[in-house]
Amino acid sequence: MSATRTSALTRLEGLLGTEHLLTNPTQLAGYEVDGLRPAAVAQPGSAGEVAEVVRFAAAEKLAVIPVGGRTKLRIGAAPRRYDLATDLTRLDGVLAYDPGDLTLGVQAGIRFAELSRVLAEKRQFLPLAPAFAEQATIGGILATNSGSPLRHAYGSARDYVLGMEFVTGEGIETKSGGRVVKNVTGYDLHKLMIGALGTLGVITRVNFKTFPLPHAQTTFVGSFDSAAQALGMCRAIAQSALQPRLVDVLDPAAAQMIDPAHARLPAGQWSVVVGAAGDERVVQRHGIDLARITKGARATAFVALTDEEEATLLGRIREFPKLAAGTSPAATLFKISVVLAQMLALLERARQVIQRNQLASMTLLRASGIVYLALVPTALDAATLARLTQAATELIHASSNSEIGGRPVIEWCPTELKSQVNVWGPARDDLMLMQRVKKAFDPQGIFSPGRFVGGI
């Protein structure tokens, strides 16, 4: 950073205090994004201070990346510039909570695990269930639109986020939505913030609809010899009257990672994990009907998990992206949105690509319409990078063609791969609209420049 900008940071220190502006190289290393380190880290303690930091950055033309638990800095394309990290972890409070009304307002820097503990005291929860649950913050979870196994029953975050407060690229504090379930205040601008990777604004507050914890719940596992049989069970569930909380499918490699001892996920089998919740009669009905469905789908085994087994297994399934990313320095994680009816065809295309490029892989499928496919080479050398690049290119094409109709994104990969492959997949028809929205919210383009779709 130039001497002029160094002087600017000295002035920023005057706004936040010495203890809340980090410039030590050792500290800055923890905020690195794809090889770029910021010159400083601002740690505002209020929404007002966030706005001051952003106004300052806009005036000085500093590139800003909002951060929280720093669990998702690998997501997105490499930034073009990165001058200042805005760390929101001091904004970690519960601002309003009405258990009787099922509404909640929190600051964006609160960690998901801590918020879950607060809600559990009132026997309530949020169906976010992200990976990196202990470290991830609410703002980061929403900015990256983190996946959840509970989407099957509760929908995505857009369905239960009631409103938000955020700071635009001009440093304007903005509100969207409200604090109650039936709300007519303003437009749903906050929904644009979900999944925008911090390129439109800095989220400072989120209002949620909360949910009561179920009176009873049980998780069932069906084991199958093939993907076709496992997905056949998923289709049968979809065509039944059952309303499970989650329906996830693990290929044998993913099952091995999730349950290394094969306590409940047998070796070499495709595992279908189904969660049922409600009153005791509802859970019992699920057990009876699922036993019938699995038998019809030619399952080799069908079991109901104990409470302890359920907590362990579902916790590791929730952490699938984290666990897969940790298996190799070259781990490359695809998140592909695709309808259940096309998942088997997608798996076959992916199998051919993976075999042709001599790579190992593991797959988690969600019947709600998401496929996580991890390529896990044992090392990252020039030859491996070449095969990884070829495989990623082929997978993007195979999953997004007219037959499959999927939307692929590479959520996690080595920085070296990002210069070879577009991690956001094929060009989107709505890119011009997205660019207009970006211009409206962030006229100078200071937020996470280059990290989002189309270089936004």
Image: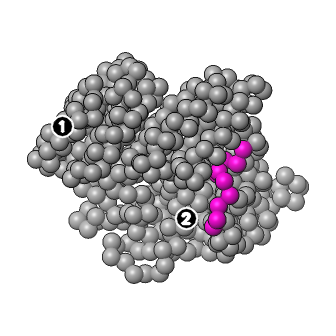
Residue at 26% over, 68% down: 101
The answer to whether residue 70 is seen in the rendering is no
Closer to us: 97 or 314: 314
Question: Which amino acid is tagged 1?
Answer: Arg
Q: Is residue 302 magenta?
A: no
Outermost residue toward the right in this view: 3
For residue 451, above or below residue 271: below
- The question of residue 428 being in magenta is answered with yes
Q: What residue would you read off at disc 2?
A: 193
Q: Could you tell me if residue 145 is visible in this image?
A: yes
Do residues under tags 1 and 2 come within 8 Å of each other at their CB atoms?
no
Q: CA distance from mark 1 to mark 2?
A: 43 Å
Magenta stretch bounds: 421-430
State the mark number for residue 265: none
Residue 292 disc label: 1
Amino acid type, mark 2: Met
